[in-house]
């Protein structure tokens, strides 16, 4: 079955740009009507949706983060990626990638998450 | 942005009891676009309910969702030991941003 796996640095300095990648296995990122999202969760807090991408490259972002977020897709590698710029301590969180089955859909498959700490 | 407010913050119950979790939206949400997730410590959330009413694949029938407009409910008919966790509601109908509630923790009494 389809599995998602996040990868990237665990520690990033303030003001820098975070880069994370989600690798999709067990299925093609280009098949079906799937939309690929990033979601984050600060320690001990709730969930925040960051944005999604379709395999064609079309994106949709959380308005509160839109100015700092870029999500891209590499269909040849079956991956999609997140870039978040101008980091502060408030961006410290577990970052999850997830799949939505349709443009407006719940997240039916999640990665295990990767912890990112923003600190000098 | 649609704000989702979950209540109570913590629910203390015993195995076998019924759990009723509430999610209230700051403006009306189409019931087609409301979901519920379960999250256990150190794990990613797991989809329970989609479209306000529909159980996700493999979810036991003791979990049920209901509601419309601004008020949605997740009911666990009889709590099993593995059901003690944090539950989040989620709306993905807004044309601006998708949002989650702050969570309800169901703990063993």
Image (cartoon, rainbow, N blue to C red):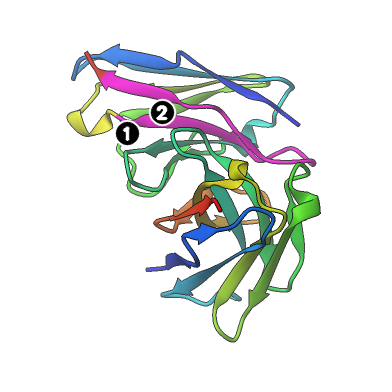
CB within 8 Å, label 1 to label 2: yes
- The x and y percentages for residue A67 are 81, 52
Q: State the mark number for residue B64.
A: 2
Q: Is residue A88 above or below residue A55?
A: above
Magenta stretch, residue numbers: B85-107
Count of marks placed on residues: 2
- Rendered location of residue B5, percent (x, y): 59, 20
The CA span between labels 1 and 2 is 7 Å
Q: Mark 1 points at which residue?
A: B61
Rendered location of residue B89, percent (x, y): 53, 31
Residue reaching furthest to the front: A120
The residue depicted at 50 percent of the width and 67 percent of the height is A8
Q: In this view, does A96 lie above or below A28?
A: above
Q: Magenta stretch: residue B87 in it? A: yes
Give A51 or B25, whichever is nearer the viewer: A51
Residue placed at 74% from the left, 37% from the top?
B94
Residues at marks 1 and 2 on the same chain:
yes
Local secondary structure at mark 1: loop
Secondary structure category for the residue under label 2: strand
Residue neighbourhood size for the residue with mark 2, other residues' Cα within 10 Å, grouped as few (<14), some (14–19), many (≥20)? many
Residue at 39% x, 37% y is B38
The chain under label 2 reads B
Quadrant position of the C terminus of chain B in the picture: top left
Find residue A40 and report its horizontal and vertical position in percent: 55, 47
Residue B107 seen from this side: yes
- Letter of the chain that mark 1 sits on in the rendering: B
| Residue A33 visible in rendering | no
């Amino acid at each position: 079955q389809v599995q998602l796996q996040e990868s990237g640095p665990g520690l990033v300095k303030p003001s820098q740009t975070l880069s994370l990648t989600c690798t999709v296995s067990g299925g093609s990122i280009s098949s079906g009507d799937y939309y690929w999202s990033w979601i984050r969760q600060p320690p001990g807090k709730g969930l925040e949706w960051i944005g999604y991408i379709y395999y064609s490259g079309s994106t949709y972002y959380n308005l509160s983060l839109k100015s700092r977020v870029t999500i891209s897709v590499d269909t040849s590698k079956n991956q999609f990626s997140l870039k978040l710029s101008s980091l502060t301590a408030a961006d410290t969180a577990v970052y999850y990638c997830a799949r939505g089955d349709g443009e407006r859909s719940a997240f039916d498959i999640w990665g295990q998450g990767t912890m990112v700490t923003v600190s000098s | 942005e649609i704000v989702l407010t979950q209540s109570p913050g913590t629910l203390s119950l015993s195995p076998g009891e019924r759990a009723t979790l509430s999610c209230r939206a700051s403006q009306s949400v189409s019931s087609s676009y409301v979901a519920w997730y379960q999250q256990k410590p150190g794990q990613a959330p797991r989809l329970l309910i989609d479209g306000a009413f529909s159980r996700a694949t493999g979810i036991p029938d003791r979990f049920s969702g209901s509601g419309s407009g601004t008020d949605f409910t997740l009911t666990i008919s009889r709590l099993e030991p593995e059901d003690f966790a944090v539950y989040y509601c989620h709306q993905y109908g807004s044309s601006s941003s998708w949002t989650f509630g702050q969570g309800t923790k169901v703990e063993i009494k």
